[in-house]
Amino acid sequence: MKRPIRRRPTARGPVVGWSVLALLVLLSHPAWAQDAPTNVQATPANAAVTITWTAPTVDSDETIEGYNVYRATEWFPDGAPEESIASSITSTPVTATTLTDETVGNGTTYFYRVTALISEGGDAAEEGDLSVGASGIDFATPSTPPTIEVVEPQPATRPAPEPEGETVRVEAEIRTPLTVGVATLHYRQGGEAGFTVQTMGGNEPDFQAEITSGRVGPRGVEYFITAADTAGVAARFPAEGFVSLPVETSGLTTSQGGGTAQSAFRMITLPLELQGTTVGDLLVDDLGAPDPDAWRLFGISPRGLFADDGGYVEIDDPAAPINPTDAFWLISAAPVTLATGPGASVRTDEPITLPLQAGWNLIGHPYAFAVPRANLTVENTSADLNDVLRFTGEFEPVAGSAVLRPFEGYLIRLTDGGTGTLVIDPDRSSPADATPPRASTGADAALDWEVRIAARHEGARDSFNSAAVASGAADGYDALDRFNPPPIGDYVTVYFPRDHWGAYAGPYRRDVRPAGASLYDWPFEVRTAEPRAVELTLGPFDEVPADFEVWLIDEAEDTVHNVREEAAYPFASAGADTPRAFRLLAGTPQEVAAMLEATVEQPQEVTLQTPYPNPATVGDPITVAYGVPAPGAVRLEVFDVLGRRVATLRQADAARAGYHTVVWDGRGATGQRLASGTYLVRLTAGPTMRTAPVVLLP
């Protein structure tokens, strides 16, 4: 039921017994003014006026139930609304402190005042007097907005490129039924968040302004124009967004280090719309003719790129095409500077869309400026982005707050591993009314805790892997889990094999389990391209529950390792065809002890196995495995045939019981290369001593 509106009593009734002075003071500062809205503002538009105001201050037992807005085509005084020449334009009181009046005609000036409907102690609302004083009334003249037509440079769908480093003169014809009050040019380089504002000069209808030469470069230029007439009615060109003005440039350069190890690889892309279009046009000048001993280039095979199926293919044809959104793996034996050659900036007034094939995708970043990771979205799929990875000597995830950089390529995969469309929006202005991008579900979700697992050998590393726990995780696959990218070169890779996850089966670099368990068991594997000495490092453990123990089980050696006590674990890998299997246990001491007892066999006596491989070459990883049945002091040393100690592999005052492994590189205590010949590895555990021979080849 509509609340009845009553007139709010004012101080305008008879005053008995007051002095003339008191009466004058009261009339100059009436009590009812406190109940009236203030700061009334009227903003004109095309056949509309928007009115805003500030709510009055009321007592604690009073409530503002709504407002009425009054309008007239001439100035009218404050006071009681029923005594005014103005008419209410609110058939029903409004509750907001703003109203758009769309019942006006262009060219007429309208005056506005506002009243407040206030209830007290639950009584019916009473309408106060009209807003008072200079800020209690405002007027506006709606009119047809100005028309803006850009004359130079022609804002075609794709304007002709402007020369790099030269001033750009922007000319526009601006017309209005009234008079142009102000015309403004807003411009910036591609990739900037804010616009430089410059007032345009000239006489109506011809206006002009200049974009300074220092802002005209390979990033391209973006601009728009605003104008307002003397009544304040404004227009914009273009109505939304901006004009993307391409810039012709001599090109950009980037440097890449040299080497033959996996860490020397880089995922690269060549930004700009380039005049060159092939490997021969764009790379041969800097790298020389294709030569596998000097440099190598790899892409994705037509059948796609999946977990670890060797989907990378070498590109050695100089006629192979290169597009701005293509990315490649490049390795060069010597450091090199790559130059793109001449081209033009990439259009920035609309997003770039790229088809995503099933599995992993190599994506190029085509712009000459950084683009936020948050500006990447996906379409034509119900999936989200599972991962965006760069390569900086190892795969590194691009977090939601990070950026995509020029010359960098990226590996991208959807959560379901299927097809879709990637959208790269270069606009960094982020208008408040823009539709927010659909980010990867859980992409930045907080984990309760995690244990990082890093592996490295001399020429490769893989650090961004983790066994994690989160309150919102599922037992199987969910969007918190991260797929493991296909490695390249002489690699080392850590992954969680999850072949039992149905449609989401595959290797993962992050496996997230639900919170609440007293024991977690993460099987994982480590694989290298060639047999290598590998060091695993686990941790940190700051976020792991303080009462949890964390142990590593080496299933190949049937050994266990307390990684809270010693984070590093060295071992010798067997190469690509034989991944090394591990399990990471985290849980309460009782649960972990029971699992270890049920899983790992304990030695019954001191044992020392023959080192392998044997014979071995200096520099190759040599695994020395031993076992002790009880805790105690342990020394593992290497002697030559004359009985001289040449290396100490382990010395511990309180080694735990169990099986252990140590990896030796065949070098002496100071790192010197040992001579070829026979050496003896000696294990001392308490009173017991064991020896085993090893032969080093030249």
Image (cartoon, rainbow, N blue to C red):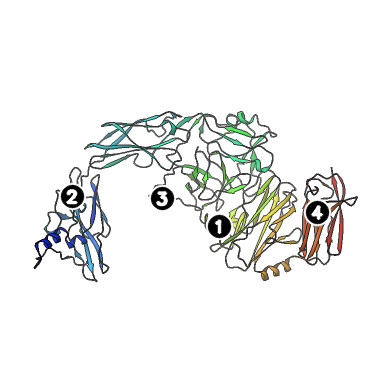
Q: Residue tagged by mark 4?
A: 648
Q: Secondary structure at mark 2?
A: strand
Q: Which mark is residue 435?
A: 3
What amino acid is labelled 3 in the image? Thr
Name the residue nearer the viewer: 354 or 24: 24
Query: Mark 3 or mark 4, which is nearer the start of the sequence?
Result: 3
Q: Residue tagged by mark 2?
A: 111
- In this picture, residue 82 sits left or right of residue 519: left
Disc 4 from disc 3: Cα separation:
64 Å
- In this picture, residue 688 sits left or right of residue 567: right
Give the mark toward the camera: 1 or 2.
2
Name the image quarter holding the N terminus. bottom left
The answer to whether mark 1 and mark 4 are in CB contact below 8 A is no
Q: Is residue 586 above or below residue 75?
A: below
The answer to whether mark 3 and mark 1 are in CB contact below 8 A is no
Q: Secondary structure at mark 4?
A: strand
Asked whether the viewer can see residue 301, the reply is yes
- Tell me the residue at 86%/64% (across/down): 687
Q: Secondary structure at mark 1?
A: loop
Tag 2: Cα neighbours inside 10 Å, few (<14), some, or many (≥20)? some
Q: Which mark is residue 480?
A: 1
What amino acid is labelled 4 in the image? Thr
Tag 4: Cα neighbours inside 10 Å, few (<14), some, or many (≥20)? some
Disc 2 from disc 4: Cα separation:
95 Å
What amino acid is labelled 1 in the image? Leu
Rendering coords of residue 349 (x, y %): 42, 39
Query: Mark 2 or mark 1, which is nearer the start of the sequence?
Result: 2
Disc 1 from disc 2: Cα separation:
58 Å
